[in-house]
């Protein structure tokens, strides 16, 4: 079968797979990789190693960011020059523990999305490239990356919006995250405290767009993991001017008013499609 032979030749030396093997060795996962491939075969064992790496690294990022960001929020006036959204100065008893448990449970599924992305990339189902020279150098890389970012932003906006406007999706998938609906119930620990299907749906534009638009390999995965860090930031209930970024003051209003501010990084999509809700300039004013 010529098609099977071509696939075998492609996998015989795969630059993406070689990079992952190098990275696994760099962070001391060669032993894990050897065990996984011996137990489950070279193909399944390879992807299992990636899953373990993603799960461990995502867990470390979540708890590190939660601890550091919580510390900074407590000292926000000194660190950021910002104040905490009115009512969020003291968190509701048990709220942080609830967010940590939900997030940790969901991480077991979240860690699988980059593995799925890796599978698509290695089997040639995407437009992902390893070297900037493949698209003509640094300037085309910047262009492709900016467009990729904007396409993903639009995709996440509409997925998030649909999770609110579709009654079934909201009730059975997204509502769980929106139980954190007051400033005293929001914290950096709520960043990835979702129904895991919810988190996957909101992240899937990163996967979908790379199937038809060129994206640099390492840039793609850096962007994917940066979403976790950004999510920590926008749930910290700080009031500050971050435009054109969709900062925490906008996302706090999203949690308290539901039908607005669906964007991920930018206020652009909400502005374009009429769902941008301006937070009050003073904590005591009524939100517009």
Image (spheres, grey):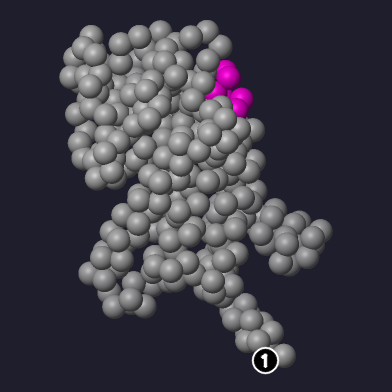
Q: Is residue 154 above or below residue 4?
A: above
Q: Which of the pair 176/242 is nearer the observer?
A: 176
Magenta stretch contains residue 100: yes
Residue 52 pos. (x, y %)? 65, 48
Q: Provide the secondary structure element on which disc 1 rests.
A: helix
Q: Quadrant of residue 142?
A: bottom left
The residue segment tinted magenta is 97-103
Q: Which of the pair 180/242 is nearer the observer?
A: 180
* Residue 267 is at least partly visible in this image: no
Return the residue found at the far right: 39
| Residue ID at (33%, 76%) | 135
Position of 135 with respect to 112 (left or right) is left
Residue 137 pos. (x, y %)? 27, 74
Q: Quadrant of residue 91?
A: top left
Q: Quadrant of residue 26?
A: bottom right
Residue 240 pos. (x, y %)? 22, 25
Disc 1: CA contacts within 10 A as few (<14), some (14-19) or many (>=20): few
- Name the image quarter holding the C terminus: top left
Q: Which of the pair 20/93 is nearer the observer?
A: 93
Q: Which of the pair 130/256 is nearer the observer?
A: 256
| Residue ID at (66%, 59%) | 47
| Residue ID at (61%, 25%) | 101
Residue 82 pos. (x, y %)? 23, 20
- Name the image quarter holding the N terminus: bottom right
Magenta stretch contains residue 208: no
* Residue 46 is at least partly visible in this image: yes
| Residue ID at (22%, 33%) | 242
Overall secondary structure of the magenta section: helix
Mark 1 sits on what residue?
A: 2
Position of 105 with respect to 183 (left or right) is right
């Amino acid at each position: 079968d010529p098609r099977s032979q071509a696939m075998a030749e492609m996998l015989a030396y795969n630059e993406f797979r070689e990079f992952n093997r190098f990275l696994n060795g760099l962070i001391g996962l060669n032993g894990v990789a050897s065990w996984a491939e011996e137990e489950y075969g070279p193909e399944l064992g390879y992807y299992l190693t990636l899953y373990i790496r993603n799960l461990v690294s995502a867990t470390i990022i979540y708890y590190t960011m939660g601890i550091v960001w919580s510390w900074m929020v407590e000292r926000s006036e000194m660190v950021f020059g910002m104040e905490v959204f009115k009512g969020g100065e003291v968190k509701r008893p048990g709220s942080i523990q609830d967010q940590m448990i939900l997030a940790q449970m969901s991480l077991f599924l979240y860690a699988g999305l980059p593995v799925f992305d890796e599978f698509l990339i290695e089997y040639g189902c995407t437009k992902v490239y390893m070297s900037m020279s493949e698209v003509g150098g640094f300037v085309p890389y910047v262009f492709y990356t900016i467009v990729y970012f904007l396409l993903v932003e639009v995709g996440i906006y509409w997925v998030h919006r649909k999770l609110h406007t579709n009654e079934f999706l909201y009730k059975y998938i997204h509502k769980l995250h929106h139980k954190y609906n007051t400033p005293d119930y929001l914290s950096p620990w709520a960043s990835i405290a979702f129904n895991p299907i919810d988190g996957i749906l909101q992240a899937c534009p990163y996967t979908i767009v790379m199937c038809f638009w060129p994206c640099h390999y390492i840039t793609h995965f850096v962007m994917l993991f940066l979403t976790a860090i950004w999510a920590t930031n926008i749930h910290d209930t700080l009031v500050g001017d971050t435009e054109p970024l969709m900062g925490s003051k906008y996302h706090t209003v999203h949690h308290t008013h539901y039908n607005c501010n669906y964007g991920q990084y930018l206020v652009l999509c909400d502005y374009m499609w009429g769902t941008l809700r301006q937070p009050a300039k003073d904590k005591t004013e009524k939100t517009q």
